[in-house]
Image: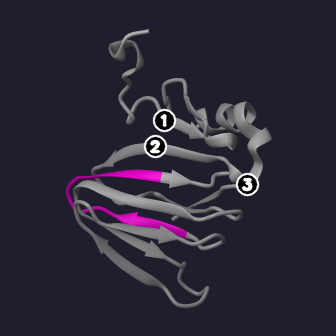
Amino acid sequence: MSNEDEKRALARYPVHLGLGGTAVPQPEFNGVQWYAGYGERHDGDGVDGRLLSMHTFSEPWAMWEMHPVGAEVVIVTAGEMTLIQGRDGEGEQTRVRLGVGEYAVNPPGVWHTADVESSATAVFITAGEGTLNEPR
């Protein structure tokens, strides 16, 4: 297999980081329904599996999300975003402005969302088992 055969765009083809140091390229990301298939493909890795993905946003997130079993690392690679941790009425809310090359950690069990003023791209390393989403 040549290097060209192994090369993939992370924004289209996320990677599962699994048990034993494995890195398993995933099928093309095609929206929210993709996550159900991802969970079925890698549920055997439990809390130790991580999803490595990259997304570009041009507006604030429409959802809150929470990862109950592990932390999520968010690394901005282009633009700026404001990561919001903690929903109103559920304790202290933290806002973290992230620029290129900066990262923040969403702790396990903390609801989070993001505001984007123009455009931002970020890499996510997510402990996705049991992830919950709710409208913002």
- Residue bearing the label numbered 1: 14
Closer to the chain start, of discs 3 and 1, is 1
> Circles 2 and 1: CB distance less than 8 Å?
yes
Answer whether residue 44 is visible to the viewer in this image: yes
Identify which residue is drawn at 46% across, 66% down. 113
First to last magenta residue range: 112-124
- Nearer to the camera, 135 or 96: 96
Assign the magenta stretch its main secondary structure: strand
Q: Position of residue 66 (x, y in %)?
A: 61, 64
The answer to whether residue 18 is seen in the rendering is: no
Q: Secondary structure at mark 1?
A: loop
First in residue order: circle 2 vs circle 1:
1
Q: Residues within 10 Å of mark 1 (few under 14, many from 20)?
A: many
Residue at 70%, 52% (x, y): give it. 48
Determine which of the numbered discs, if any, sits on residue 53 in the image: 2
**Figure check: 94 above or below 127:** below
User: Is residue 45 shown above or below 104?
Assistant: above
Badge 2 amino acid: Ser
Instruction: Tell me the distance, in whole angstroms, between the alpha carbons under discs 2 and 3.
Output: 17 Å
- Check disc 3 and report the residue beneath it: 47
